[in-house]
Amino acid sequence: MLRPAAVGLLLMLIFPRNDAANEVDLYNQAKYFLQRNYEDIKSWSFSENYTYWKIEKKPNEHPIKAKLENWKCENSKNLSNSFNPSLCRDQFIWKIERGMRCPFSLFVDLNMTVINNGTQASNLLRLDLTNRTLVVWEPQGNNETNPTSKFKQLLQESCDFSATATFQGQFAYQLKRPRGDHHG
């Protein structure tokens, strides 16, 4: 880890767990469900702006809300020996090979340690993983410095990450010819 007087580059690559499924597309899953179960769908939506939620909302129903929980970073590897830094800055990279495509925001709040004026500082980051395959965060932007300190270090870490996505609520649809046994 970096010491308070150290100057360096922090590069974190985060990958999904190996046993995770390929990308899940919730929109296509819902579309498949509706096509398989109903013949005459006029319209449907996950959105809270859909007409149903504005006009006919029932007290025990609400549009789907998404949440990411149980963030884990496992099998951490220190890969610091393979680089020789010529510039200093923090850079965090999340590479998402198996993710989720959906119309909901999937946020995770992470407490990140970054370099600030030669010392470490804690920084809360709200990361949106929705429909993403790559996220790059550079807290200092393009503010690179020349590492002249004898304490200069380069730290590169990699880990397999996982998170549990939970969804609660209903999606609404409208039939072309409403039937008495279905609500939409």
Image: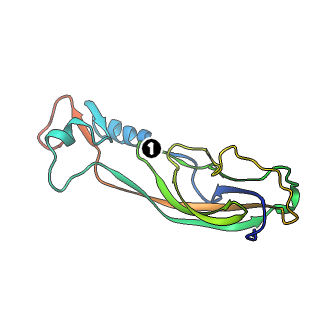
> Horizontal and vertical percent for residue 167?
37, 55
Classify mark 1: residues with Cα within 10 Å, few (<14), some (14-19) or many (20+): some
Q: Helix, strand, or loop for circle 1? A: loop
Question: Is the residue 164 above or below the residue 49 in the image?
Answer: below
Residue sitting nearer the eye, 48 or 127 = 127
Residue positioned 69% across, 62% down in the render: 159
Question: Is the residue 121 above or below the residue 20 in the image?
Answer: below
Residue sitting nearer the eye, 1 or 108 = 1
> Horizontal and vertical percent for residue 34?
32, 39
Residue 184 in view, yes or no: no
Q: Is residue 76 left or right of residue 40?
A: right
Question: Is the residue 34 above or below the residue 121 in the image?
Answer: above
> Horizontal and vertical percent for residue 151?
84, 66
Residue positioned 73% across, 63% down in the render: 118
Residue 19 in view, yes or no: yes
The residue carrying mark 1 is 102
Q: In this view, does 93 lie to the left or right of 77?
A: left
Residue positioned 34% across, 39% down in the render: 36
> Horizontal and vertical percent for residue 179?
14, 37
Question: Which part of the image, by quadrant, shows the N terminus?
Answer: bottom right
